[in-house]
């Protein structure tokens, strides 16, 4: 096409500017322009497209590292289009990656802020009690024992927070290796219910356990106990006075669904998606009053997911909350 164009330009030039058409000159000029065009095409092909090819290969290497789907070209025009689409895809991937990193950075900052905030309160309390005791309170029989006991409670709270943080970090870094075994789940539920009976009775809450038919599961018993304790204690902490917590078991094919159902305060829908996040609380002051760290449900979710199972929550404000998780039946 370029060669033909060049030939046509030579004829037009001869006709208009030289005033006559000399066939030999025209043919000679056409051949020269044809060869020049061919050389130009070869030059473009070897230099420009080779460079494009190199860029494309580099972009593909970047893209293959991020496992994005890649297309293949048939010719040079395709090659340019392909390069364009690969660069666009790469830009998209990088944008998503940056957003993900920004989110992680935000979580990290939020987490550090939360940890220091959680620890600050009991530490300042201890400092206050100790200073008062040193300032003469130690000799004052009406407060010395009481302040020491309060300081001890704050120490307990710090230990509780640190234990929860340790558990979370072990679960998140995969350091915690599950030790699954075959055990009977209803017996475990009953053990936990017995241990929490006192707590429930002080609030007049009834704890209902499932029937007696034994159901065997394959899981880490110690960790599942931790899950049950967290869910049952929460149902008491956030349950209404003289309310009820029901633990129900539903057998499915090779799984068992365990539900902890309460008729307590319930949770507004906007809180549900974030409920399993570390330190997330619906009502901060109520959680604090109940000695909560806001880490319980995050730990529960990690444990269940480490078992390759799922946990769900459904709730209606003023009606109650249901937490349900699955385990493998054996
Ligand atoms: P916390 O130590 O604050 O109890 P969790 O992680 O166990 O932390 O729970 C997170 C938040 O979820 C609680 O602060 C509470 O607001 C809410 N929550 C958990 N369980 C229930 C429940 N059964 N009923 C109502 N709210 C609940």
Image: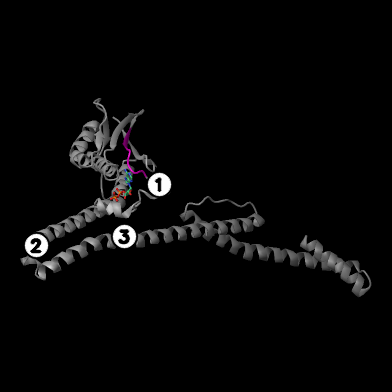
Distance from label 2 to label 3 (Cα)? 32 Å
Q: Is residue 287 above or below residue 102?
A: above
Instruction: Determine which of the numbered discs, if any, sits on residue 154 in the image.
Output: none
Say which element carries label 1. Answer: loop
Left or right: 157 as drawn, with respect to 89: left
Q: Main secondary structure of the magenta part?
A: strand
Neighbourhood count class around disc 3 (C-alpha, 10 Å): few under 14, some 14–19, many 20 upward = some
**Are the two marked residues, 2 and 1, in contact with CB atoms closer than 8 angstroms?**
no
Check residue 44 for magenta coloring: no
Report the mark closest to the observer, 2 or 1. Answer: 2
Spot occupied by residue 287 in the image (x, y as percentages of width and height): 29, 51
Q: Looking at this view, is 284 or 36 the one in front?
A: 284
Of the numbered discs 2 and 3, the one sitting upstream in the chain is 3
Based on the picture, tell me whether residue 264 belongs to the magenta stretch: yes
Q: Which residues are magenta?
A: 257-266
Which-is-in-front pick, marks 3 and 1?
1
Q: Which residue is depicted at the point 10% across and 69% down?
A: 134
Camera-nearest residue between 183 and 249: 249
């Amino acid at each position: 096409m370029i060669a033909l164009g060049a030939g046509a330009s030579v004829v037009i030039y001869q006709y208009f500017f030289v005033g006559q058409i000399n066939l030999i000159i025209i043919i000679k000029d056409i051949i020269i322009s044809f060869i020049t065009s061919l050389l130009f095409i070869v030059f473009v092909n070897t230099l420009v497209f080779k460079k494009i090819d190199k860029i494309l290969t580099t972009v593909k290497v970047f893209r293959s590292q991020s496992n994005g789907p890649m297309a293949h070209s048939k010719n040079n025009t395709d090659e340019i289009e392909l390069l364009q689409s690969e660069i666009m895809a790469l830009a998209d991937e990088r944008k998503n990656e940056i957003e993900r990193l920004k989110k992680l950075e935000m979580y990290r900052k939020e987490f550090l802020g939360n940890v220091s905030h959680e620890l600050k309160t009991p530490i300042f309390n201890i400092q206050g009690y100790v200073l008062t005791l040193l300032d003469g309170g130690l000799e004052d029989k009406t407060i010395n024992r009481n302040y020491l006991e309060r300081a001890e409670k704050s120490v307990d709270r710090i230990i509780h927070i640190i234990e929860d943080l340790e558990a979370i970090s072990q679960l998140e870094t995969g350091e915690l290796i599950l030790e699954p075994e075959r055990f009977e789940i209803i017996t475990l539920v009953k053990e936990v219910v017995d241990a929490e009976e006192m707590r429930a009775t002080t609030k007049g809450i009834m704890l209902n356990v499932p029937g007696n038919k034994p159901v065997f599961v394959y899981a880490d018993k110690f960790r599942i106990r931790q899950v049950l304790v967290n869910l049952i204690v929460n149902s008491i902490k956030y349950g209404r006075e003289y309310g009820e917590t029901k633990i129900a078991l539903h057998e499915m094919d090779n799984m068992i669904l365990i539900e902890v159902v309460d008729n307590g305060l319930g949770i507004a829908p906007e809180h549900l998606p974030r409920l399993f996040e570390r330190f997330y609380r619906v009502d901060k002051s109520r959680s604090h009053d109940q000695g909560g760290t806001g880490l319980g449900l995050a730990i529960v979710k990690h444990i269940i997911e480490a078992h390759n199972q799922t946990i769900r929550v459904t709730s209606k404000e003023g009606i109650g909350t249901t937490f349900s998780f699955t385990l493998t039946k054996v």
